[in-house]
Amino acid sequence: MEKFVIRGDKPLQGEIRVNGAKNSALKILAAALLTDDDCRISNVPQIEDIFRLLELLEDIGVKVKNGSRGEYLLNARGIKKSSLSPSIAQKLKGSILMTAPLLARYGRADFPQPGGCVIGQRPRDIFIDGFKAFGASVRETAKGYSLSAKKITGTKFVFPLVSVTATETMILLAVLAKGKTNLVNAACEPEIIALADFLNKMGAKIKGAGTPFMEIEGISHLAGGECEIMPDRIEGGSFAVLGAAANSPIKITGINPGHLEVLWFLLAKAGANFELGKDFVKIKPSQGLKAVGLKTHEYPGFPTDLQAPFVVLMTQASGLSLIHETIFEGRLFYADVLNQMGAKIIMCDPHRVVVQGPAKLSGRHLISPDIRAGIAMVIAALIAKGESVIENIYQIDRGYERIEERLQKLGADIKRINS
Ligand code: EPU
């Protein structure tokens, strides 16, 4: 098992570039299942979640060629089965995205029961209702779900709440459906716009991506396509928060600052000193931070995936910040671990904590529960005095490529140890 050993409180400085976005690449790679032609996808981050999805694609017969770093050529002509391998699919919640193209093209898809998830229940009811609305029958077995459909027919589907992967799954189903689909209360994340842009390049007819109202005219055939994965806004935001928490001059490059408007607003309100450029943010030392509260929200609100790093930042700010996690019910439990490091965080209920800062953090033995709490622990360890050991770093590798090597270039004392 690998772990990180971090000796904190070292001066950080320099430039760090963000990689392609995990939560865009997963969907774009799944979209390659919709065509028999080649799809060339570049800037794919080399992270565990992507490796799992590629394994799943290869397992059903997709030919995957790995070109130069981060470039993949996929061809789905030779699909030989439409059931997802349970052992791989259960490691990756996003694997459900593959079911829509399989159902649309081959009339069948089987996927396993999703396993439990540390950040919350992750129910699948909206997906099931969506599949049924498009004319599929859904059979639930002890092992999972069996979807089948003689024909996928366009429909009006109203999402009862905003869900990113459910929106993407219904888009993937609608593009090859017979007739028109209207999606109402669709998620508006930039990753959804990127997926729609790629599908439109392949010949799909999608309007309204990035708004809650989408209209999709189904067509019978999609061609191959090329796509460069968009920058990872969550990685960019995590690095910006690291710079502000460490009060260190760090330039984060290759970002789209327009994807993180609420983060910039809150950083400015907290007194962080930074400069935004066309594709970068330069974090500069500041005169001390003030507490600010936040409520996570669907895009363009404050992303739940940045909530944990921001809580670490608030441990360094003067005053009380109320942090309200509205999306997932299990995404604040890492707060206990930060308290062991010296933070003063009061858990009000599973959705809300109050952070009292500033607090001096000290190194501890930590276990990463999920990707985003994992990166928050890395940030906490980097600003803490003394040594921290972080275990279960598979969780961090799921979302952040070679994070230790990239942080070492900023001067961080972080090592990957194999024990
Ligand atoms: N929900 C339901 N029923 C459903 C589906 C979702 O009740 O059938 C609920 C969820 O329980 C949650 C809310 O809807 O309370 C929103 O969840 P959403 O479906 O939007 O989350 P997701 O699509 O499963 C994606 C990202 C997450 C990110 C969330 C929110 C991917 C692969 N995952 O998850 O990313 O936190 O949107 O923005 O795109 C991460 O990268 O670490 C991560 C967890």
Image (cartoon, rainbow, N blue to C red):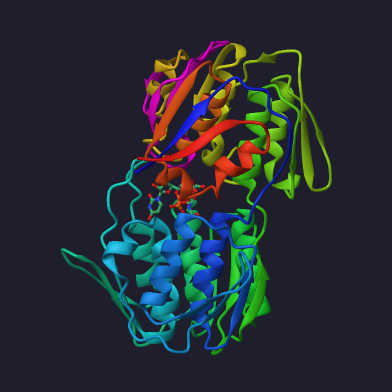
Q: Magenta segment range?
A: 346-373
**Total residue callouts:** 0
Name the spot of residue 134 as percent of width and height, x first: 41, 75
Asked whether the viewer can see residue 392, the reply is: yes
Q: Residue at x 35, y 86 (%)?
A: 80
Please state, as top left, top right, bottom left or bottom right, where the C terminus lies in the image. Answer: top left
Q: Relative to the observer, which residue lies in front, 39 or 293?
A: 39
Q: Residue at x 64, y 55 (%)?
A: 190
Q: Residue at x 63, y 23 (%)?
A: 245
Name the side, left or right, on which 191 lies relative to 98: right
Q: Relative to the observer, which residue lies in front, 187 or 4?
A: 4
Name the side, left or right, on which 352 lies relative to 107: right
200 over 364 or under it: above or below: below
Quadrant of residue 367 within the rendered picture: top left
Say if the magenta span includes residue 370: yes
Name the side, left or right, on which 167 lies relative to 339: right
Say if the magenta span includes residue 363: yes
Q: Relative to the observer, which residue lies in front, 374 or 384?
A: 384
332 over 168 or under it: above or below: above
Asked whether the viewer can see residue 297, the reply is: no
Please state, as top left, top right, bottom left or bottom right, where the N terminus lies in the image. Answer: top left
Quadrant of residue 296 within the rendered picture: top right
Name the spot of residue 46 as percent of width and height, x first: 54, 58
Name the spot of residue 394 as percent of width and height, x first: 41, 46
133 over 277 or under it: above or below: below
Q: Residue at x 54, y 11 (%)?
A: 360
Quadrant of residue 240 within the rendered picture: top right
Which residue occupies the extreme left position in the image? 142
Name the spot of residue 225 as percent of width and height, x first: 64, 80
